[in-house]
Amino acid sequence: MDRNQLKKWFESPAKMGHKYSLHVVYFCTGCGIIEIPPSITARWDAERFGVIPVATPRQANLFLITGYVSVKTLKAVIRTYEQMPEPKFTVGFGSCPINGGMYWDSYNTIKHLDKYIPIDGWIAGCMPRPEAIFIAVTHLWTLIDKEMADGYKKYKENYRYYRANQEQLYGKLDWPPLFSEEDKK
Amino acid sequence: MQIWGIILSPLLALVVGIFFLGLSRKIMARIHWRYGPPITQPVIDIIKLFSQKSISHGTIFDLGLILSLAGSFVVILFLPLGQMCPLSSGGLLAILYLMLLAPLGIALSSGEAANPNSSIGISRKFLLALGYEVPLLFILLAVMTHYNTISLVEIVRIQSTTGWSFGSLPLLLSGIAYFLILPAILGIRPFEIAGAGQEISSGANAEFGGKFLAFSTIQHALHEFIGISLFVNLFLGGWSLFGILEPITNTVWGVILGIIVFLIKMLIVFILGLFINAVFPRFRIEQAIKYLWKWPTLFAFIGLIVVVLVK
Amino acid sequence: MSLELLIIVAFGGAFLTYFLGKISSKLRNSFAVLNALALVVIIACLYGQTMEKSFYFGFFSLPLILRNNVLSWFFAIAISVLGALSVIFSLSYMRNRERTDFYYLMMLLVNAAMLGIVFSGDLISFFIFWEIMSWSTCILISYNRGPALAAGMKYIIMSIIGSMAMLVGMLSLYTTYGTLNIATLSTLVASSSHGYLLFLLIIFGITFGIKNAVMPLHTWLPDAYAEAPSPFTAVLSGMLTRMGIYGFLLIMYVIVGAGATLHLGHGFFTFNNILAWLGAITIVIPTFIAMLQNDAKKLLAWHGIGQGGYMILGIAFGTSLGMAGGIFHTLNHAIYISLLFMSVAAIQYRTGGVRDLNSLGGLIKKMPIAFIGGLLGICGLIGIPLTNGFVSKWLIYKTLILNGAPFLAFAALIGTWGTILSVYKFLHNIFLGQLPEKYKNIQKSPFSMRLPIIVLSFAILLFGILPGIPLKVINAIDVSLGFKSLNVTLWGIASDSGTLNTINIFAVVLVFGVIIWLLFKAGRKAPKVDQYDNYAAGAAIPKGKYHYTVDYYNPFYRMATPYLKDFVDVFYMKIAKWTQNLCNTVRRIYTGYVGNYVMYIVLFMAFLILIQLKWSVF
C-alpha cells in the first residue's frame, strides 16, 4: 500500500484520492449481498482500505453489482451507474453477472452485464468470499494506477452501442440519453 | 492580533474539525474491534471528492452550499478560540443567529435538488433543531442572566477569574442539560436522524456528489467544531485552567497555551460524545423531540429558575 | 410643503382616481401611481419639520388639528412608500378584474386615512380618520366576495368594538380635561390618579390591541389577511395593522407619558409587564399555529400576528433600547411581510390564484425575482444576520436579557425557531422541489410586480447592513418621547454592554463567500441536470405525480395538532352563536299578528298598574 508515500500524493493527488477513497454503492441485486455485511463490519473491516458504503450513487465512485441481474433490476443498475459522478469504477461480483451463472437459461435474467454497462473487473465465484473483494480492490488500485480502469470513458465513447443494447431489451427507456452526440466530440 | 486571529482561527477550526472527523472514524472502528481507516481518511475523501465530476441542479443548489460553508466560517470568527476572538460584536445573540446561516444554506441547496429524501432530511433537521433549541435557549439565557452580559468573550473572561460555570452551583443544571443535548446539536447518534444513511439516503446530502459533498463534509466538520467549542466556552471556562495560565495572559505564549488547553478540552468533550455515539441506536424523530422536551428541558428550565432566584 | 396640502392630495386624489377610471383605465392607473408617488415626495419634504395647525369647523367647539413630528413622519413615510409600491403592484395584479375603479379608490382612501391618523394632532380627527380606515379596510377585505365577506364582517365587528372603546376613552378624557388636543393632554394627564391612568391605558389598549392583533384580540386577522386581495394584504399587514403600534406609542408614551406608564400597578402586575407577557404569548402561539397552515397567505398572516408580539415586547419595556427595537421592528416587519405577500401575489397571478402550499413547487426556475423576494423576506422574518429583522430583534432580545426578563426573552427566541420551520416550508413548497408539469410553461412576473419586489428586497438588505439609516430617525423618536439617546452609528449600535456592528459581519460573510465561491469554481465544472435526473433508488422519476411536500413536518403535526388550535377564535365564535340564538329568540316576539301586539300592550299596562298599586312610584 503506497498510501503513505507523500511523493505520490503530490504527483497525482486525484489518482491517489480515487484509489484510497472508494465509496461503494452496493447494489443488492441478488444473493451476493450476503457477503457484504461481514466484509464491511468487524470481521473483515473494509474501511481500513478506505472502502465504505454510501447512501446514494451521487456520492459513490465504485459500483459493486452483487449477484444475478434480472431484466427489471438492470434498469435500476443502468440508472444508478449513469448517476454516479466520474470517474467511476464497476465491479461485477459472482458468476451470474459474468455469464448468467446458474441462471444461464433463465428467461428474465441477463447473461452478460458488460453488454449494458462497462465493467472494470470481475470477481468470479459462487459465492466469492469477502477476501475476494479485497483482492479485487487491490487489483482495482493497480488498474487505477495504470489508468486502465477506464470503463466510464468507454461508456462515453461507445454510448451508442450500450444505449442500443439497453433499448433492445426494453424498447423505450424512461430517461433521455446521457450523452448527446456533441458531448462525445 | 485581530488580523492574525481572522486568518488563523478558521484554518485552525478547519484542521481540527477534519481531524475530529478522522479521529471519530478511528475511535469508532476501535470500539467495533476493527482496525479502522487511517486518521487522514477524511482528507483523502475530500481530495477525491474535489476531483470528481458532479452534477448541479441549479443556481441555488450551488449558492446555498457556499452560503452554508461561509456561514460556518463566520460563526467561527465570533467564537473565542482560547484567548483569541477575532470578532465579538453582537455577542452570543449574534452567534445564535449566525448559526442559522449554515442549516439554511444546506436547506436551500438540497431543497432545489428536488429529491424527496433531501426534503425529508431537511424537515427532520429543522424539527430536531426545534427540539434542542428549547433547552438550548433556556441554557443560554441562564448563562447570560447569570453573568449579566450577552458577550461570549466576557463570559469566558469572568470564568477565568471565578472558575468554570460547570463547577459553579447555579449553572450546574444548565451544564448538565447542555451535555444531554450535545449529541443532538452535533447530529451524532442517538440523534443521527437528519442524515440517516440507511433510512433516507443520508437526507440532505442525497443529491450531493463530488465537490458539493466535499463542501458538505467540511461544513459538517466545522459544525462539530462549533457545537463543541460553544460548550467549552460556556461551561468549561474556555482557555482557563485553574488559574495556571493566569500570569501569562495576553502574552504570545499565553495565547498559544490557551489555544492548546482549549483544544484539549474540546477533544475530551468530543471523545465523550463519541462514546455515546458508539453505543446508541437511532431515535425516531418524534422520540427525539419527546426526549429533548422532557429531561434536558426540565433541567434547563429549573436551571434558569435557579439562576433567576439566586440573582 | 404643508400638511393640509398633503391631506387634500391624499383624499382628493383618491376620489379623482375613481372618476378618472370612468373615462379610461390607463389614465386612472397612471394617476393613481402619480398620486401615491406625490404623497411620498410631499412627506419626504416634511422631514425634520415640527408643525401644528388647527382648523376650526365649529364641531362641538373643538378644533381639528394636524401636526407633524418625528414619530408621525416616521410612520407616514413608511405608509406612503408602502402604499405607492402596493399601488404599482396592483397595476398588473388587478388587470382584467371587475370593480377596479372602486378598488383603487379604496386603496388610496386607506392610504390617505392612515396618513391622517399619524398626522392628526387631536383625538377627534384621530377617531375620524381611524373610522375611515376601518370601514374602507372592511370593504377591501370583502372585495373578493364569497368567504371574504365573512372575513370582512369579522374584521369590522371587532374593529367597531375597538372604536367604541376608544370613543369611551375620548369622552372620558373630554369630560375630565375639556380638550382633546394631544399635546395639551400629554401635559395634563400624567398628573392624574393611577386608577384613571390605568383605565385610560386599558380602554385605549383594547382599541389598539384589536388593531395590532394582540393575542386574545387577534381572531379577525388570519381570515382578513388571507381573503383580502394580495396587494392590499401587503398594506394591511405592513402598515395598517401596525397603526395599533402607533396607537400604543401615542397613548403610552405621548399622552400618559413614559414616567407614569412604567409605574402603574404592583409587583408583577404592572401594566407594561402584563402587556409584555401578552406580547410574548402573541409571539409563541401564533408562530406555532403558523406551522400547521397549508395556505400560503394564512401562514404569513399568523406570522403577522406573531411578529406584532415582538413590537409589543419592545415598546412595553420602555427603555430606549427596547423602544428603538420595537419601532424599528415595525418598519422592518412592514418591509418583509409586504414583500412576502407580494411574492405570493406574483405566484397567484401567474398560477391563477393558487395559494395552496401543497400544490405548488419548483417555481424558482420560472419566477426567479419572486423567489429572491421570498428568500429575503423569510430571512428578514427569521432575523438572519445582514437582513433588517436581525437588528431589531437583536435590540429587543438585548433589552429583555439585560432587564432581567429571561422568560420573555425565551418566548421571543423560541418564536424565531418556530418561524424558521414554517417559513422554510413556505419557501420550499412554493419555489423549491419538483416543478409540477402543469406549471411547465409559466412566465416570469410582469415588470410592475418585479419592481416593488426588487425595491423591498433591496430595502431589506440595506437596513440589515446599514441599520443606522432608520435608527437615526428612531433615535430622534426615542429622544422626543423622553428617553435617553442611543449611541447610533451607521452600521449598528454601540452601548455599554455589547455593541452591534453589522458592517463587519457583512465584510466577513462577503470575504468568506468569495473565497469559497472561488474554491467552488476551481473544482471540476458541474453540468446542470434536469429535475427528473434524480436519485430515486435507481428508478426513473414518475412525471406529474411526484409530490412529497404535503404534511412537511408530519411527525410534529401528529404531536402538536391537538394543542395548536385557535381556542380564542372558537370561544368568540361560540359567543357569536349564542348572541345570534338570543336575538333569534327575541325576534319571535314580533309575530305579526295585531292581536298579539294588543296583548303585549295590555300586559304591559297591567304591569305598570300593578307596580303603581303596590308601591305608588309614579
Image (cartoon, rainbow, N blue to C red):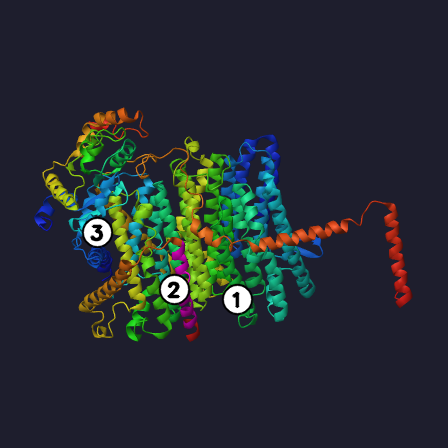
Residue at image mark 2: B296
Tell me whether marks 2 and 3 sit on the same chain.
no
Where residue B85 sits, quadrant-wise, is: bottom left
Was residue C258 drawn as part of the magenta stretch in this picture?
no
Q: Nearer the viewer, mark 2 or mark 3?
A: 3
Chain name for mark 1? C
* Callout 1: SS: helix
Q: Nearer the viewer, mark 1 or mark 2?
A: 2
Q: Nearer the viewer, mark 1 or mark 3?
A: 3
Label 2 neighbour load within 10 Å: few <14, some 14-19, many 20+: many
Span of residues in magenta: B286-306
Disc 2 to disc 3, how far (Cα)? Answer: 34 Å
Label 1 neighbour load within 10 Å: few <14, some 14-19, many 20+: many
Does B174 sit above or below residue B110? below
Q: Amino acid at mark 2?
A: Pro
Was residue B288 drawn as part of the magenta stretch in this picture?
yes
Q: Quadrant of the C terminus of chain C?
A: bottom right
Label 3 neighbour load within 10 Å: few <14, some 14-19, many 20+: some
Left of B85 or right of it: where is C395?
right
Left of B201 or right of it: where is C405?
right
